[in-house]
Image (cartoon, rainbow, N blue to C red):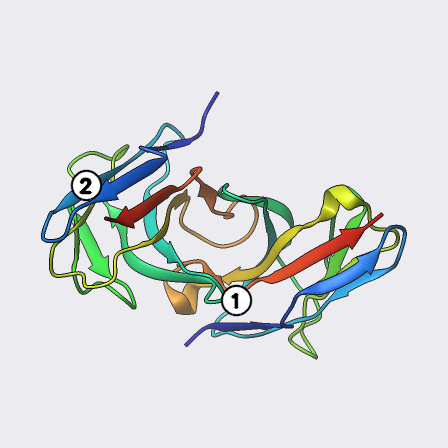
């Protein structure tokens, strides 16, 4: 079945530092890949997505590239801000999983001024 | 504006009581999902529905029930059989299929507490 593995947190950074959150996946079929962000007490919001190999999703300075050869979709940002503090979830959906969204466990990011 | 609405935001349940969480969407999505979120455990799938009048158990369906009488609505009942219901519950919807625009849209969540 489908599964997503992402690095455990919390990840603690100083403002303007470089961010990487690792995500790898196992899927049947050709998955679409997503990163979601969750702020305290709220639901998840889509941050970015990629639907085929070598696609790069980007939004608000965050980027992730769909790497089929390494089954990865790592999230990066060149310079984090305090307002980026949140929990980040890697996810996928595919025909092999009946298109049900499958999520990683989430990675908490804490950015200090 | 299109979106997905959960209510209430906070809910308190007494021991042995059933409670129902509401989820409504006006996105015309075929698929709807209920997830449970506990600290450090990510999102766990409770039930999902991909068509009206049909739904399937997810990974942790015991102690929960759902209905899908309308495309827009997918209420979740937490029954007295659920021994540890205190959690944050998230409802989501999506279109079905491959490729672009297949992301899930989430409600704001309902925090259920047993008192």
Q: Position of residue B40 (x, y in %)?
A: 50, 66
**Residue pictured at 20% horizontal, 34% vertical:** B70
Can residue B103 be seen at all in this image of the molecule? Answer: yes
The numbered mark 1 sits on a residue in which chain? A
Nearer to me, B82 or B59:
B82
Nearer to me, B78 or B59:
B78
**Residue pictured at 41% horizontal, 60% vertical:** B38
- Apparent side of residue A24 relative to residue A76 in the rendered image (left or right): left
**Which residue corresponds to mark 2?**
B20
Q: Quadrant of residue A107?
A: bottom right
Q: Position of residue B64 (x, y in %)?
A: 18, 56
Residue ranking furthest to the front: B115
The numbered mark 2 sits on a residue in which chain? B
Crowdedness near tag 2: few (<14), some (14–19) or many (≥20) residues, C-alpha within 10 Å? some
Residue A105 — which label?
Answer: 1
Q: Position of residue A85 (x, y in %)?
A: 70, 49
User: Is A90 placed above or below B20 here?
Assistant: below
Can residue A59 be seen at all in this image of the molecule? Answer: no
**Residue pictured at 33% horizontal, 42% vertical:** B30
Q: What's the distance in space between the residues labelled 1 and 2, CA to CA?
A: 26 Å
């Amino acid at each position: 079945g489908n599964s997503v593995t992402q690095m455990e947190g919390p990840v603690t950074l100083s403002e303007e530092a470089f961010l990487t959150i690792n995500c790898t996946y196992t899927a049947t079929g050709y998955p679409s890949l997503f990163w979601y962000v969750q702020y305290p007490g709220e639901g998840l919001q889509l941050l970015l997505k990629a639907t085929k190999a070598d696609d790069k999703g980007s939004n608000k300075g965050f980027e992730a590239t769909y790497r089929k050869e390494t089954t990865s979709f790592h999230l990066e940002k060149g310079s984090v801000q305090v307002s980026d503090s949140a929990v980040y979830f890697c996810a996928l959906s595919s025909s092999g999983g009946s298109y049900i969204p499958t999520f990683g466990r989430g990675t908490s990011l804490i950015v200090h001024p | 504006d299109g979106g997905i609405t959960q209510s209430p935001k906070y809910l308190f349940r007494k021991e042995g009581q059933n409670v129902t969480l509401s989820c409504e969407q006006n996105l015309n999505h075929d698929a709807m999902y209920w997830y449970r979120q506990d600290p450090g455990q990510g999102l766990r799938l409770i039930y999902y529905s991909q068509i009206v009048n049909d739904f399937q158990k997810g990974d942790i369906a015991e102690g929960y029930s759902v209905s899908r009488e309308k495309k827009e609505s997918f209420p979740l009942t937490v029954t007295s059989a659920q021994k540890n219901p205190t959690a944050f519950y998230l409802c989501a919807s999506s279109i079905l299929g491959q490729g672009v625009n297949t992301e899930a849209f989430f409600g704001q969540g309902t925090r259920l507490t047993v008192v």
